[in-house]
Amino acid sequence: MYRREKGLDGKLARLCEELSRLRSAFMSAPIALCLVDQDLRYVEVNEQMAMLNRRPIEAHLGRTLREVVPEIADAIEPVYRQIFKDGLPVERRLISEDTNDGERFVLVNYNPVKDGAGMTILVSVSVLDVTMEKRARDQADAAAQKLHDVLESTSDNIILLSGDLRVTYVNGQAKRLFETNELALGSTLPQLIPGWAESGADQKLAAVGGVREAQHFEAYFASLDRWLQFDLFPTNEGLSMFLRDVSDRRRAEEGEQRAREKIIFLATHDGLTGLANRSTFYHALERMLGEIETHREIVVLYLDLDGFKTVNDTKGHPIGDAVLIAVSERLRRCTEKTALVCRIGGDEFVIAKTDPGSASDIAALAEAILGSLSCEYEVAGEVIAIGASIGIALTKSRLTSDELVRRADVALYAAKAAGRGNYRFFEPGMGNEFFLRELRKRELAQALHRNELALEFQPIFDLKTGRVATFEALLRWRHPDFASVPIDSVIAIAEDTGMIHSIGEWVLREACNEVSGWPNAVRIAVNVSVLQIQSRSFGDKVKRILAEAGVKPSRLTLEITETVIFVGERQATDTLDDLRQHGVQISLDDFGKGYASLQYLKKFKVDMIKIDQSFVLDSHSSFASVAILRAVVTLARAFGVATVAEGIELASQHELLLQEGCDFGQGYFLGRPMSSSDCHQLIQQQLGLGLI
């Protein structure tokens, strides 16, 4: 019995000791604690609770809530009663006033204390001051809101990514750009941004991986038709991505770049055809010649279009330009990008090629070019026919670019002199002809001012009566240093340089002044170039000269050639018809020599045709020529057109033409070209014989 009591006393002592420790912990706890019984009286209160209620501990014990804290009794008494009723804990967040430090925020936990039967006998209350935590959280929330406001108000498109590059935030600007919403959160960039894969941004982003420094790049998104600038900043959470629409800047830069490229292109290329220009050609040729040791040979082909000036003048520059563009395309196809093709001005082109192969290879290229360029061109409903001539120069040594091109130009002149539509390789000795031609060109420009031009007159006789019907005015150039300049060469130079208009007008005026002193029965014939007929003012110019000279239009015959067919037929027809109505006679020269003589008699109304002298010269030995003469005379009579035979040099030819019924004749047998004074003497002889 004694031992049992002693054992109970020990347990009681330990229990009291434990209770003492618990009470000590309760009283010294850093949070406010109290116990309240069913009568709502304070059973126990620690120092922190006493300080919170601003009353000593002794003022709490045994007293009701309403007695101790009457100011909050109405708010807290229902809480206690509810806990004693249902035995469930309650948590409340309260705001209290602190006169020294403003509002304070507390967290109050109400926990039931139950007996062995599960009945709530006490309520344990703990009050934790969370003011600092609340203020810190509020500050964090305020900062987050401010950041959110900034991110939403910026003009940049902002996307925040997690460490695995999934979207954690998209600002409003980016949502509008990519037409997305909050559902984008958690998605990947390819899912969020249209055209991500095609833009190449994925590869650029992958290159950023592992780099803990800011990265920047730009990418084009075709589906958005936008250029976006990416500014990437690594963060602890992942990646901050700032996107800016730089489309306007990029397009402006691209526009400036295109403008610069266009300026450079225009400076180095022909603006019409897109071929390299003269400057680019010479620079490239100098480069080729500087590397001559690495090449077996260098060739230059110099091209000039035959008949282009006629097209340009008659059809107009727009059609002429279209033909030049077509020519350039054909040249590109012929060379197959293996050569440098350039337009160096007007209707002149040059081609430079390294390692061109054998002479036969080069000749084949030239023939291919001539064949291609001679094919008809269809432009604006017009069918245009032109040709080309080519001069070719080769070198295996270091010539200057000027010398190599000059040689090709000399060869070009030789090709033209051979009848156009040809090609010629440069040969030593050709240069003399070239320089002579250039010299003649310069001298002819001064011939009118120096009074070096003159006319001779060759009579045309009526074969039946033997009277002088007409004198043909023939141009002569009496240059002090040139013994004799072929008239065909003079006319060719005049046509090439444009001097044909001023020289032609001078010839017409001199001829009309001459015929004004002859008997009215004697006419004057003047050759006119197709280039003169192309001029819209030609008809008025002829009328004015006739009026100024006091010569009746019926005393003037204009001799034209079949090449008029290559000018606009309507223009030529209108001009010639107007002059015929005015009284001027039109003669078709070199009939039978050209392209479409029969068509001329149908389309162009002429008064006479001059049979080409080749048929007359062969008439004594060629049955075919006699047959052609007879056919031409018969055909002309059917059309009501007079015939003139050129090149009569033998009595037999004269007799034949008379027998065949040819109307008029001209040639050395009848009369050579003569001066003005000799003309007057012949006329006087004819007057004396009563022929005029």
Image (cartoon, rainbow, N blue to C red):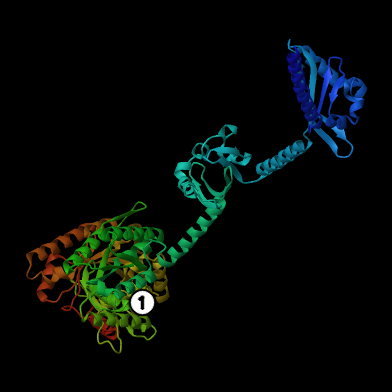
- Number of disc labels: 1
Quadrant, the N terminus: top right
What percent of the width, then of the height, locates residue 438? 31, 80
Of 218 and 545, nearer the camera is: 218
Q: Residue furthest bottom?
A: 480
The furthest residue to the top: 117
Taking the image as shown, residue 501 lies to the left or right of residue 645, namely right
- Going 89% across and 37% down the picture, which residue do you hit? 99
Pointer 1: residues within 10 angstroms few (<14), some, or many (20+)? many
Residue 628 appears left or right of 368: left
The image quarter containing residue 632 is bottom left
Where residue 496 sits, quadrant-wise, is: bottom left
Identity of the amino acid at label 1?
Ile
Left or right: 649 as drawn, with respect to 246: left
> Which residue matches tag 1?
503
Spot occupied by residue 63 in the image (x, y as percentages of width and height):
91, 20
Q: Is residue 262 left or right of residue 111?
A: left
